[in-house]
Image: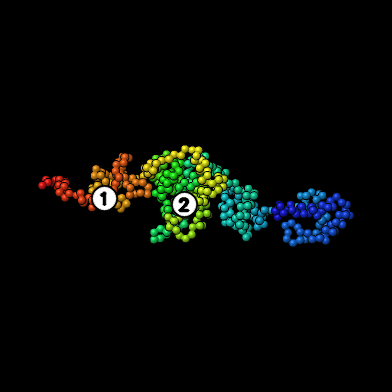
Amino acid sequence: MTDETRERIALFRYRLISPVLAEPARQQNEYFRAQAQNVHQVPGREAPRRFAVSTLKRYLKLYRKGGFDALKPKARTDRGRPRRLKGEAWEAVCRVCEQHPTWSVQRLYEELADRCLLGEPPIVYNTLLRLVRKDGLLHAPARTDVRKRFERDAVNELWVCDFMHGPQVKYGPRSRKAILCAIIDDHSRLIVGHGFFVSETVTVLTEVLKEALGAYGIPKRFYVDNGSAFSADLLAKACATLGISLIHSKPYDSPSRGKIERYFRTVRQRFLPDVVGTLTLDELNFSFSSWLGEHYHHHHHRGIDMTPIDRYQASAGKVDLRRLSALELDRAFLVRHERVVANDATISFQGKTYEVPPAYIRQRVELRHPVGEPEALVLYDNGEQVANLKLVNVRENARTFCPTEASDKMSFADGKVAP
């Protein structure tokens, strides 16, 4: 019986006896005999009941002696504790808690189950949890990792990025799982970069980041986890070139990226249920972009008490957004490779053959290309751009080939006198 129910029963009893509290005994007896003929609905009981005159007199006596609290039903002496745990069984539980005060309730429950100290039949975990908390039997060490809610003062102060696994999409002859890469602005909750892909690589990440930088400017901080894509040298070099502080969260600490995780939950609850059938990757990205522009960015956000687009625009007008040209962004996100130039002044890259200036024959050279454009190879020497490489055109080379000159070169190379 709860305290509220006991309170209601005491109030019900008071109302039965209150009319004759100040009356003489004769009138009290007449009143109680009349009430004994009636049926009363007692709080906390389904069936109505009658009260004997002696019961009503006992209520009056209790009230005069102890006041209103005396009318309350007596609580169980083992209140709040299951009857399967009493006496020695409960004392045994308390002793285990005293011996191991820093244990978790889960570990305590497992230990008590192993010792058969949970009663017969055993009490459930939630019952033990309630008892332990009520009596303060365990004293877990104070947490030192308390996380407080925070928010940056302006847009582009902090961007947070992560991946989310999405639905199946048509990709070539078979289906693949789509993976969403998204970047959220901490201050406005605006999604500054996004895209569904079929992989979770640094190439995907840098494509999304490069597009976000071109559209919204350069952030001061870029907060990511410790996945392979976020730990790649390409991302670190790009951030170093652009002057962005690259920050990695602690391993397995997804709550530190709570805003992007909360956004992913919104995507699962509001966008994905409307995705009907298996779409292609392009169709999924088109639908997602439409949903962002028409719904999420213009929908009231409880965390900021306004829409993300309104908050972004209000803040963007008060700060200087640092922007770079497309060429500067391309240079910051150049992917680097090394190759050894063959004797015919060519290098092989991703199954294709490119021409290299003859001066670099048998040398190890550095190649760079923009993210997502591996065919746009550029030769670098000591950090300086030397030439844009082009594919070998064997037919064009054949038209400029002179057999006599080639024979002379071969003769001199063999140590013979040319004719």
Tell me the kind of residue under disc 1.
Val
What residue is rendered at 45% in x and 41% in y?
Answer: 219
- Kindly state the secondary structure of the residue where label 2 is placed: helix
What residue is rendered at 28% in x and 50% in y?
Answer: 391
Residue 82 lies in quadrant: bottom right
- Upstream in sequence: badge 1 or badge 2: 2
What residue is rendered at 83% in x and 55% in y?
Answer: 57
Residue 175 lies in quadrant: bottom left
Residue identifier under label 2: 289
What residue is rendered at 41% in x and 47% in y?
Answer: 206
The picture places residue 357, in percent across and down from the top left corner, at 25, 44
The picture places residue 13, in percent across and down from the top left corner, at 78, 54
- Kindly state the secondary structure of the residue where label 1 is placed: loop
Residue identifier under label 1: 392
Tell me the kind of residue under disc 2.
Ser
Residue 185 placement, left or right of 105? left
Nearest to the eye among marks 1 and 2: give it.
Answer: 2
- Foreground residue among 148 and 317: 317
The answer to whether any part of residue 225 appears in the image is no
| Quadrant into which the N terminus falls | bottom right
